Image (cartoon, coloured by chain):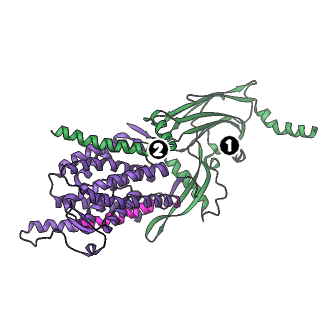
Amino acid sequence: MQIYLPIAEVSVNAFLLLGIGGIVGFLSGLFGVGGGFLITPLLFFIGIPPAIAVATGANQVVASSISGVLAQLKRKAVDLKMGIVLLAGGLGGSAIGVWVFARLTAAGQVDLLVQLSYVFFLGFIGLTMLIESTRALMRSKTAGGPVRRAHTHNWVHGLPLKMKFRASGLYISVLPPLGVGALVGFLAAIMGVGGGFIMVPAMIYLLGMPTKVVIGTSLFQIIFVTAFTTVMHAVTANTVDMMLAILLILGGVVGAQFGAMAGSRLRAEQLRILLSLLVIAVAGKIGLDLLLRPAELYTLTPGLLP
Amino acid sequence: MIRLALVAVLALWPALVGAKEGIVAGLSESRVSITADFDGSEILIYGAVKREEPIPEGPPLHVIITVEGPSTALTVRKKERRFGIWVNTEAVQIGRAPSFYAVATTGPLHEILSETENLRHKITIPRAIRAVGISDQARDAPGFVEALQRVRTREGLYRMDERTVRLTESTLFRTDVQLPANLTEGDYRVRIFLTRGGAVVNALERRINVRKEGLERFLFNLSREQPLVYGLLSLLIAVAAGYGASTMFRLVKR
């Protein structure tokens, strides 16, 4: 069944969109990430204009994060205070990101920025996570290995403006969470992602938060950052396609629930290895597109240069 | 004064002579609605050649039909290898290019239409694209215009269908023009040309109104006129769907 998208002005198969939403939702439920880093490239691939894919992707992440955070709230696995600090940084980063996105769209380099961000961030995070979780898995197999401390003290703990985060059991400066939040907000705006794949490792390794509150807290703040990004894109560039969003969301929220069920049967290290492999695969695919000669060297964009 | 009148008559002479063969034409649809399930549309264009006299001697009659979508300005960008990766480098701005353009004819276009007439009526695809003053924008500016045609042809937006107009007894003609699913809205101009020996003897213009309807219309208008409301509505849907799904699954699991 073909469906005409009013803002994107293209006609696509409705079941294809439901399917994409469903698969991405399943993975996001499984790994506790928004899934934006998958949905935006997939939308590029089926011919949705990049600007619309990015903005609508953000809208879809709102839905899947809400679905996820409600489950986490039940388990009391959300550090609301930390979430709010991250959010404050996130909104600032997002506003800058939307502005940069609009400027680069005008300069014709937005595709490059989006692609480079994907390759760089996904590649880096994927590799780090793969190495770390493989080590963790090895360690758990060899019984009697060195016991790892809950968190180690590093330079992050020497910064001023300290604050207590009870749910995470932390007493640290607000500057690192603000910075992490801002970076993620910026990426959310230019990549159409929630930034969970950066937020989660940053919370664990940089802020030293306990793993049990990480996913819930990251989802909590992603809701607000992507919600803000969606509205900003809708207002500044009219690039949110509601019809597209609805189909992706319908597939996504259902998929997310099945993913969460499947996730409870796998071990944390195994999950992280799978997620890292997926992240590396996406980064590799986008990287290849940049390196290989494209089939068509020319692209058309409506409108004149400003 | 007399000289002026004479000039006017001389100028009008070809038109007066040409009017010996008039066109009567119809379209199967003068209005195309883009609804949610829009998947392209086929327009039948038909008509007849009206004459007061018998079919004139000389070169045979040919029919050329063009369908042209609303024109917009465009920027064509070219990728080049820089620092090992492919990035956009040069750009050429095209003043006006139709969003859709189809040409259907009764015979090979270069035989039935002279270059001067093509220039005057802007019939072929390269003539329909207005790209003036582009030569100083890039090293190989014409290559960008060719790329524009190539990309749009591949997307089914520019079509050159020679010999797809059926002409019976030099009088009745008909053709089908396929409008693709990725259509933009606006007025689509249908032009019908009669040619003899490469010269246009008469022409007629009709319009097809392509519009988004129903939900498509509503969403498009809302996104342009009330972007904030539209953005918040998109959010509301996302929130409701996320909440709804998790509540529903909790109930199912119980």
What colour denotes chain A? purple
**Residue at image mark 1:** B113
Q: Nearer the viewer, residue A150 or A134?
A: A150
Where residue B31 appears, x then y in whole percent? Answer: 55, 31
Which mark is in front, 2 or 1? 2
Disc 2 is placed on an element classified as: loop
Where residue B10 appears, x then y in whole percent? Answer: 85, 38
Where residue A28 appears, x then y in whole percent? Answer: 26, 52
Could you give the CA–CA distance between mark 2 and mark 1, rounded to whole angstroms? 39 Å
The reply to whether residue A49 is visible in this rendering is no
Q: Does A145 appear in magenta?
A: no
Chain letter belonging to callout 1: B
Q: Nearer the viewer, residue A34 or B105?
A: A34
Task: Find the residue positioned furthest to the left.
Answer: A144
**Residues in magenta?**
A106-130
Residue B25 in the figure: left or right of residue B148? right
**Residue at image mark 2:** A7
Chain letter, green = B
Where residue A53 appears, x then y in whole percent? Answer: 41, 51
Q: Amino acid at mark 2?
A: Ile
Q: Nearer the viewer, residue A151 or A259?
A: A151
Q: Residue at x 43, y 47 (%)?
A: A240
Chain letter belonging to callout 2: A
Q: Residue at x 36, y 40 (%)?
A: A14
Q: Nearer the viewer, residue A194 or A72?
A: A72
Q: Amino acid at mark 1?
A: Leu
In which quadrant will I find the N terminus of chain B?
top right
Instruction: Write down the quadrant of residue B112 in the picture.
Output: top right
